[in-house]
Amino acid sequence: MRYKLLQEGDIQVCVIRHPRTFLSKILTSKFLRRWEPHHLTLADNSVTSATPTGYMENSISYSAIEDVQLLSWENAPKYCLQLTIPGGTVLLQAANSYLRDQWFHSLQWKKKIYKYKKVLSNPSRWEVVLKEIRTLVDMALTSPLQDDSIHQAPLEIVSKLLSENNNLTTQDHESIIVAIAPLLENNHPPPDLCEFFCKHCRERPRSMVVIEVFTPVVQRILKHNMDFGKCPRLRLFTQEYILSLNELNAGMEVVKKFIHSMHGPTGQCPHPRVLPNLVAVCLAAIYSCYEEFINSRDNSPSLKEIRNGCQQQCDRKPNLPLRLLHTSPDLVSQEATLTESRLKPVIVTSNEIHVEVERNNTANQKMTAGVGNDSEPNLIDCLMVSPTCSTMSIELSAQADRILGCYVEILKMLSDYDDWRPALASLLQPIPFPKEALAHEKFTKELKYVIQRFAEDPRQEVHSCLLSVRAGKDGWFQLYSPGGVACDDDGELFASMVHILMGSCYKTKKFLLSLAENKLGPCMLLALRGNQTMVEILCLMLEYNIIDNNDTQLQIISTLESTDVGKRMYEQLCERQRELKELQRKGGPTRLTLPSKSTDADLARLLSSGSFGNLENLSLAFTNVTSACAEHLIKLPSLKQLNLWSTQFGDAGLRLLSEHLTMLQVLNLCETPVTDAGLLALSSMKSLCSLNMNSTKLSADTYEDLKAKLPNLKEVDVRYTEAW
């Protein structure tokens, strides 16, 4: 039978008070009156007895208890314990046999644990100490008490012993680790013990103790730890353990097998905390590689300061635009001459980095003009203030280089698991790496594999993380596009990212406008080389009137006509424009209803049959149209009322409508598969007066947001939704 360990306040004037105990029976008032003179209070280091006039003048310490026995003689009071102390005995009576046994085992445990603390606090011979540790571990494993402190108390005693004795041999280290290994199967090691384990991993990475003892401990940490911020030494121990695996003969193959064991053999990892914990370890390890450069660049706190909590954020200077400069005067003159040939990479070490605060820099103001005068410079601006920055390379020490290579490889392994990729992309979407890492060519080149895996994944929740998390902040898309500090090719990865984004739900004016403003040159260059995705991009820019400048339009047309695929797609665009002109010519009906079961193809044939410039009311209710028909709907210039009741029209089509049909007044989305992701786009349709979202996946928050952003909205139907 298992018992709960008694804590302070469990026995106090015969009332059981334990906030976490599973005992519900309280001693009766009759019992209190009968045994009132003989009841004890279990304090932290002693037992105190209550008398009719109050408490005893002197408490009874656990060390003073000579013996604890169960009363078993004939006619003895029921459920009693006898405590033998100098000068007499004290009787304790419980309400039942279970409670009596709980008190008995708890007092025995307290008495023994204090004995071991005393014995191990002054070690003389280590062979005796090791024997005592094994006995202590056996006692904890065989105890009938069920409490976290039963296993934690021996670990803390051993941890204190190791921290106070630094002259142990390696053999002593391994013997102690093996002795306490059974306690670590279901318990995290205390902080001081983690430091001891880290030291052993660094000094003896090839020891069998690392594989046989530390592996299950680290697996348990990765599976069950909820926050490394509360226990950073667990993260450091995990980090050192993985590095020790990398030091084995097989190297990364051993690490790969360990990662696979954490994921499991199935296609879905059964432990949701493994991936976030592994990513946290990787990010911290990569940051440590550049810590020396970061600390020499500005007054950012070091990892040591962060761990010790010595420096708070409020004590630091405010962030300012920074520029990394080299002390060589040649580079200053080269920076001033923008037309000179490409500079050779500059090897920068930590003692050569200087910081220049850009306060009234005209060039910097031009860079950030698009973001706003009061906004912080984005990541690319910080890294590309001058040509020298883009050619700078950082030289790491041999140890830091090994750490970087190991943990970037782990990120690559994580990106290879399909079930982990969405969560990994989400964790890496706000770029979590320091600027020094992103300016390091080796790091960005190795990390490129992870970004490629995101760009190849057809799931929207994965490849959408390539974009920035919010306006004004650059994401992986900007970092690896031509002109970005991480781009080391001619735009192949950029084209791949654009292709997957265009194939999803980002075929919108906003996305095309951002490409036209920032990446038009690379798009035209790749189109000139025959890249079909870029040819399609240029055609859409012309079709949606994204480009206002006539010379730029003519340059795009010349680019399209220079290749066979571009010429073919441009001819198709011209044909569509002629059809659009005919479609939008004044005339035709003002109201139109398609028969039920009509499809996207039926709607396309109908709209290509004549002029619909006067069409104001279109009903597609109970048809089989999908989001694909949105490309035809946005061509109707006079459309004011649209009925999509019980169709398969989804979020992608809704986004397209919101960008082009800004004059729409009535929209019926009843029983359509639209969600909050598409409904939020309706906030740009300021002319909406009536909106039916009956039986959709509308949430209450989205509904409140739409009401606040649509001032003309008067009629709304949200029945059978969360907002109802």
Image (cartoon, rainbow, N blue to C red):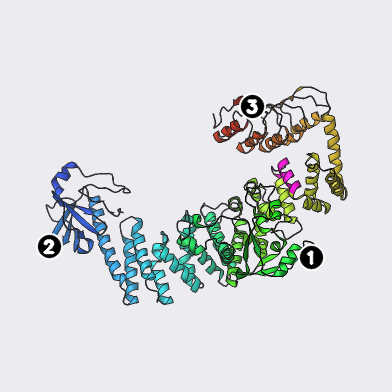
Q: Position of residue 259 (x, y in %)?
A: 55, 60
Q: Quadrant of residue 156?
A: bottom left
Residue at 69% x, 34% y is: 658
Q: What residue appears at the point 72 percent right and 49 percent down from the top-left corner?
A: 498
Q: Quadrant of the N terminus?
A: bottom left
**Is-magenta flag for residue 180?**
no
For the residue pair 617 and 658, the one nearer the viewer reads as 658
Residue depicted at x 54% and y 31% = 723
Q: Nearer the viewer, mark 3 or mark 1?
A: 1
| Type of secondary structure dominating the magenta stretch | helix
Q: Say what secondary structure mark 3 lies in.
A: loop
Q: Residue 174, how many percent across, how many down?
A: 42, 72
Frontmost residue, 330 versus 139: 330
| Viewer-closest of 530 and 525 | 525
N-term-proximal mark, 2 vs 1 = 2
Q: Is residue 126 left or right of residue 341?
A: left
Residue mark closest to the camera, 3 vs 2: 3
Q: Which residues are magenta?
A: 502-517
Q: Which residue in the protein does label 3 denote? A: 712
Image side of residue 191 versus residue 640, left or right: left
Q: Which residue type carries mark 2?
A: Gly
Q: Give the labeled residue for mark 1.
A: 341
In the displayed structure, 242 sits above or below 569; it is below
Distance between the Cα atoms at labels 2 and 1? 96 Å
Where is residue 524 shown, x and y percent of the image? Answer: 81, 51
Q: Is residue 123 left or right of residue 427?
A: left
Find the distance from the CA under tag 3 to the CA under tag 1. 59 Å
Q: Which residue is mark 2?
A: 87
SS at mark 2?
loop
Indicate the amino acid at tag 3: Asn
Res 508 seen here: no
Q: Is residue 142 left or right of residue 233?
A: left
